[in-house]
Structure formats: structure tokens, C-alpha cells
Image (cartoon, rainbow, N blue to C red):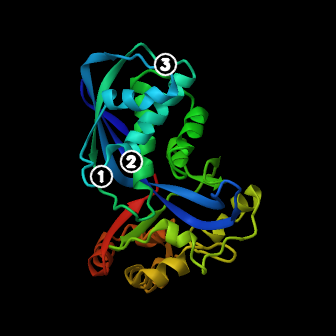
Amino acid sequence: MNSSLTSDSTISRLSPAKINLFLHITGKRADGYHNLQTVFRLLNWGDYLHFSVADDAVMQTANSESDANTLCHQLLVLAGAEGITADIEDNLIFKAARALLAFAIQSDALPRQLAQVTVTLDKHLPMGAGLGGGSSNAATTMLVLNELWQLNFTCDELIKVSAKVGADVPIFIFGQDAIAMGIGEELTAIDLPDQQYLVLTPDAHVNTAKLFAHPKLSRDIAPLSIDIIQSQSNDYVQNLNTPYHNVFTPVVTSLAPAVEEALNYLQGLEQQALGTARMTGSGSAVFLPLDASIATDKKLLAKWVEEAPCKGYVAGSL
């Protein structure tokens, strides 16, 4: 992930959005979660997180994982996230820091002195859009704190910890386009061509629990092998051909007219863009892959954004 030092004690880092090129549910698990198959694509557009390190270190006295919550309150100051959650402990940034501390305590890897860190969130991604904003914030926090606190956990270790914070968090720890299985934590890198997208974010939000309980939701899509998904990328990268689809699309469009309107708008541009419009994740955002011949036509893209029924953005693959 992109990062830069803006001063001697502040790190700024892009917290990128993701899109799902397709999204299948292959069955329900014994733990209540659902197994899925998808290809995650990271974008060069998202939120920004700024990490400021205090001069004075905090002496920690944590002895068990139960101490992680108290220690997190001492070590983490969160700014710019007002209104996202009523309680800081429900914020994914706080949850990520707490999970990291708990794992460090469990692993007996926690230094005696730790720097207090202020995390300032510069929010651009809408919540509930299916773009992974909160999950990306959590992963970015975990990656940076792993460095600042010199915990030195590996990527594989962080992925395991991050899966406990949220199903979409591991892909942002992984940091590259990937085929995902399980609940999203079984990741296999995939090499995809650079791509530009027109992304629309309707002002709509559908409760996730309501989506998973909906009778129209397909939960038994036949699983595909990793080899098949890798070899059939032409069927879901630019265009979306059978059997690839997003199982949430008919559910969300039936519950949120604004999403249906945005998707219809993009479908009207498919012939020019030479791509298939689709929904990402289980949220409200929709996107249209752009052919290379269209991606450089800034005047046309600006027109499409201006005429869209909701906020629109042109973003590229990371």
C-alpha cells in the first residue's frame, strides 16, 4: 500500500477501495458464516489514514489477552471517525488495533514500551457501499501499527488475526488482487491487466443481515477450482459471462431502487465502454469496466460522471 512520511512523526497511507469482479456464495458454514468465491480487485482510490506518533512512550503492563482492550484505549487516539460508530470500541480501526495487541500478548511479543499513536481518518469512501472502506481502514491500521510498535508479525500472521476483525479485512493485508475463498481469508494472488472503472455510489444502504436472510439470495452456487478461475479471467474481467455473477445483485436492486437506477445507467453505457456493468460486494456501489480506448477519453468520462444519477468516480486498479 502507498505510504509517505509527511513529517518526522507522521505516516500517511492510502486505505484503498476494493471491488468484486464477481461474487458467489457456495454454502453455509457450521459457524454461521457463508463460504464464498470471488476475485478481489484493489483500486488506486480510497480513504487516507494519518498516523502521528507521540514523543512519550507508554509502559504497558498487559499480562493476558483480556488486557488488550484497556491497553488499546491507552495507546490509540482516533480522530475523524466521529459519527461512524457511537462507541469507539465498535470502530473497525479500534478493533484492528485491539486484535493486534491481543495477538502480541498471546504470542509474548509485546514490547515493554509502546508509542501512543493518533490515527486520523480522512474519509472518502461511503459506508455500506461494498467497497470495503472500513475493512481497508482496519487492515491499514494493523499494517502500520505492526511497523510502529515493531511487532514484526508476518503477512500470514496478520491475515489470520485480521479475519477475526472482519471477512473483508484479509484482502487488504494481502495487498494485491486475489481469488478469495472461505469467508474471504483464503487468498490466492492473480495477475490481472491494468484497468480503469467508472464507479457509482448511490445513496442507499441495505442491512447485511437482511440480505443474507432474503429468499432471493442464491447460497448454493457450484464451487469452481482456483485453476478454472485463473484460466477464465476473460469471462469476468471486462465482461461478465456465465457462470460468473454477483449473487447479491437481484436482492439489493429489489430492495434499493437507487442501486437499480445506477446499474441501469451504467448498463446503458456498456456498448461504448465495451464492458459489463455490475454490483460490487453486498453493498450499493456499482461499476463499469472501461475499455482502454475509452479510459483515456477524459472529456467523455467527465460527461458520464456528470450525467450519472448519483456520485460517480473514475478509478484505476492499484
Q: Locate residue 150: give its quadrant.
A: top left
Q: Residues within 10 Å of mark 3 (few under 14, many from 20)?
A: few
Mark positioned earlier in the residue sequence (3 or 2): 3
Q: Which residue is mark 3?
A: 63
Q: CA distance from mark 3 to mark 2?
A: 23 Å
Residue 8 image offset from top left, x and y in percent:
24, 23
The residue nearer to you, when weighing 143 against 220, is 220
Pointers 3 and 1 in contact (C-beta within 8 Å): no
Where residue 166 appears, as percent x and y from the top left, is 51, 49
Residue type highlighted by circle 2: Asp
Does residue 274 appear anywhere in the picture?
no
What amino acid does circle 1 point to?
Ala
In percent of width and height, residue 172 lies at: 49, 46
* Cα–Cα span, label 2 and label 1: 8 Å
As drawn, is 303 to the left or to the right of 254? left
Residue labelled with disc 2:
90
Is residue 256 something that shows in the picture? yes
**In the structure shown, which secondary structural element does the residue marked by tag 1 occupy?**
loop
Image point 38% across, 40% down: which residue? 94
Cβ–Cβ under 8 Å for marks 3 and 2 = no
Residue 262 sits in quarter: bottom left
Quadrant in which the N terminus is drawn: top left
Kindly state the secondary structure of the residue where label 3 is placed: loop
Residue 29, image x, y percentages: 70, 58
Q: Nearer the viewer, residue 9 or 43?
A: 9
Tag 3: amino acid: Asn
Q: Which residue is mark 1?
A: 86
Mark 2: which secondary structure?
Answer: helix
